[in-house]
Image (cartoon, rainbow, N blue to C red):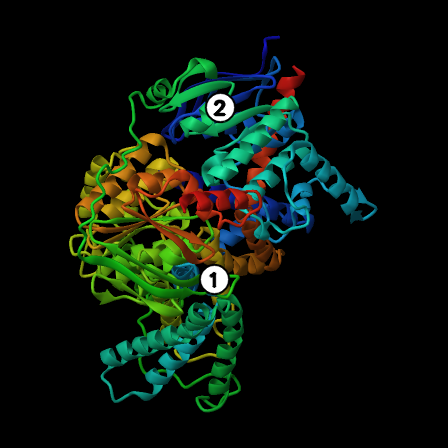
Amino acid sequence: MKTDNRAFIVRILLTITISLVIGAFFILLIGESPIEAYIALVKGAFGSKLRIGTTLAGFTPLLLTSVAFAVAAKAGAFNVGVEGAVFLGALVAAYIGINWTFLPKPILLIACFLGAILTGAIWSLIPALLKVYYNVNEVTVTILANSVALYITSYFVSGPMSAGGTVSQSHPVTVTLPKIMFPSNANAGLFIALAITICLHFYLKKSKYGIKLSFTGTNSLNAEYAGMNPKKVIIYSMMISGALGGIAGCIEVLGVHGVFLNNFAVGLGTNGMLASLIVKNNLVAVPFMAFFLATLNAGAMGIQQNTNVPKSIVDTIIAIFILIATMDGIIAYVKNRRLKKTNKTEVTR
Amino acid sequence: MSDYIIEMHNITKEFGDIVAISDGQFNLIEGEIHSLIGENGAGKSTLMKLLFGMYEPTSGDIIYKGEKLTHHTPKESIELGIGMVHQEFMLIDDLTVWENVILGSEPTKGFSIDASKAKKEIQAYIDKYKLDVDLSKKINQISVGEAQRVEIIKVLSKGADIIILDEPTAVLTPQEVDSLFVILQHLKDDGKTIVFISHKMNEVLSISDRITVMRQAKYVDTIENKNVTPTMLSQMMIGREVFLDNKKTKPKENFTEIGLKVENVWVPGDKVISKLKGVSLEVYKGEILGVAGIDGNGQLELEEAIAGLRKIEKGSVYISKNETTNKTPIEIRKKGLTYIPSNRNTRGLNRQMSIETNLVSTILDEERFSKSGLINFKAIKENALKLLEDFDIRPRNPELLTSAQSGGNAQKVVVAREISHASEVLIASQPTRGVDIGAIESIRSFVQSASENGVAVLLISADINEILSLSDRIIVMFEGEIVANLKSSEANEENLGVYMMGGKLGGFAELGEELHNEDR
């Protein structure tokens, strides 16, 4: 297993290098210096306290959505619907944070989180039930459900919950998470996200439910035979996944924006899914991948501001990176080819 | 150039830490039937997969007609005229026989497949070797024996002169084995060279010219068939004599308490409306009831219905005195069911998990393994170490993935888990399928000892010898019904074989009639 992990890390690092090299080629094509661009990228992500904070602020919700995707994936469910849970969780958290002022602040904060958790879990329960009992593909349902969630929240912040300005957003919430790197948006939610990730990792490793989850995800027929009730396991994993999305939404509202901002989470679900898929849903590696993607996203702004390289170059690099990281088949093919070649040369000798 | 068309010298093959072959030797003379015999895990299949190019040897030489093969692939082997029929068929159920045969090398006419040419070519092989397959049937409409013949046609049609058959008889009835041997003889007469992998001594002795024996990853010897006796062969295979025919001398008859009762059970099938049509049976505590039958006659549905894995449409199941009809698998287990499923790879084991985890998968709820939701890893390891020892499971490494084990040892993991806590009822379905002789012997004795401890054992097996040697009573299933119910003393290989064929299939029908008449 240890050597497996090492090979895995080497592969990821190699993938990063290759995609940066290909990215450099594109930067050269538009007549800019790749070295300068990459320096700008690093500076953009880590160049000052503000920039580090911004990177961390982007990392926080991404970490949660990546882990959310990974948990469901480990049980064999492909939950594309984390983003919907983020939106709805955020909406409920905002509603509670704005209106339940009769509660003392610390309890109100907890109420916001609980509301978001419940909302996310129940939202993801729908595709889970459909999958388990009616054999409806969860990918289809969750993709569609994402739009539904987005439009529900748009309706509320443009209508009943609107603050009335030109921007579609709610009134400010009365309770917030403390900022940690002023003036950036980084906030105490970062610690919440990290703590949840670590706890979840150990929970899945050490608990009965965690073992059942692995059994279900790797061979549900065997899990059923052993009496583990794979249906229940999948339902729970989807609910945990949705709950994590809800928490991400709550942190965005209470920690970053202070209001519910229309469309604020577009892309969070998909990026989380990418981070998780690239590392094959490995919970130890997921945070690093989420951090890497957050860095690229934050650094992209630096590139755009300080060089003539457009931000879309970074998107290109991310795309190349994903392509290469998911190229298992090609790597195997290349290996075979190499074997064959050595074979041929030996024959001719 | 030597007399051999294939020579394999000093072969070793390692998979990570596991040594699959530590000293492999093999050679082939053109036109012979050469058996490769040994227990499962002895390395026979691996050795042949090395020859076929599916794996690469860690060290050693493979020589084909005097020329050394390095890094050869299965495709290149096929080009050299080496073909392999694998243990698990590689056929596509929804395509017809001829479509399966041409798959990958379709003869074309313009943009379309030249079906008539393909059919004609295939029919030529069928006629030449008397393979008896209907070209236009779909794979899911033909029997296992026919499917195997399709595999043989596939290999022939790619121009193979050396044909490797990996445990071809494991899935066949005695009658089908006989007709396979006739085909092999035809192939030999035509000058083909055949490698026949098996762990069944009588088969090997009846078909081979020469026999190579392997034991525990090592080459033992290659001998002429005419110079060998069964006793010698079994000693070479496992280093001592075995007694597989542990047929009960005195069948116990004073059973009183019912362990398992199945009453008029109907179960819908995947493709047909009813796969089980009103099956009733009773197994007493301490008794072994053998269920004989060719695969696919409702045995799978029966075992899964009892275990709660399949919906029972009508009828009821009782374990001891508790009704368990359509209860969940875990509820049924808690009433006292233990169950060795017929499909160990998908049902019985999670091959991506370790041996120790698999050994507790069905009993995770027990307090010693999990307290308030948390797993006690120490207890799991202790449990595994004990069972590895008690059931002689190899290698003795509880953390190893079960996918790294040989078939026999993987099956022992299932057997150990189920038998170690068998209480009321044990379903043992195909418990020794694809398992080596040494393991067969011990698995059978474990099943036997479970019944001696008062467990009601339902033994489902397509292996007639297994049924005959273990059962107190025998029923035969055919097309979802119980067609015969015999005391073990009345049953023998012939009458069971006929009942298993339903007394219907051409050729055997007359034989069946005769036997029936004799019985009367």
Find the distance from the CA under tag 2 to the CA under tag 1.
39 Å
- Residue found at x 41% / y 72%: A129
Q: Quadrant of the N terminus of chain B?
A: top right
- Is the C-beta separation of discs 2 and 1 under 8 Å? no
Q: How many marks?
A: 2
Residue B293 visible to an observer of this rendering: yes
Decide which of tag 2 and tag 1 comes sooner along the chain. Answer: 2
- At label 1, the amino acid type is Gly
> Is B305 on the left or on the right of B106, as rendered?
left
Which label belongs to residue A52? none
Check the image and report above or below for B420 versus A319. above
- For this orientation, the residue located farthest to the top is B1
Q: Chain of mark 2?
A: B
- At label 2, the amino acid type is Ser
Q: Which residue is mark 1?
A: B269
Q: Which quadrant of the figure has residue B62?
A: top right
Q: Which residue is mark 2?
A: B35
Relative depth, front residue between B467 and B518: B518
Q: Position of residue A50 (x, y in %)?
A: 41, 62
SS at mark 1 in the image: loop
Residue B53 visible to an observer of this rendering: no
Q: Position of residue B336 (x, y in %)?
A: 22, 57
- Residue found at x 35% / y 24%: B216
Check the image and report above or below for B15 versus A228. above
Q: Chain of mark 1?
A: B
- Residue found at x 49% / y 90%: A159
Check the image and report above or below for A149 versus B267. below
Relative depth, front residue between A106 and B205: B205
Q: Which quadrant of the figure has residue B445?
A: top left
Q: Position of residue A136 (x, y in %)?
A: 50, 70
Relative depth, front residue between A234 and B424: B424
Check the image and report above or below for A317 versus B164. below
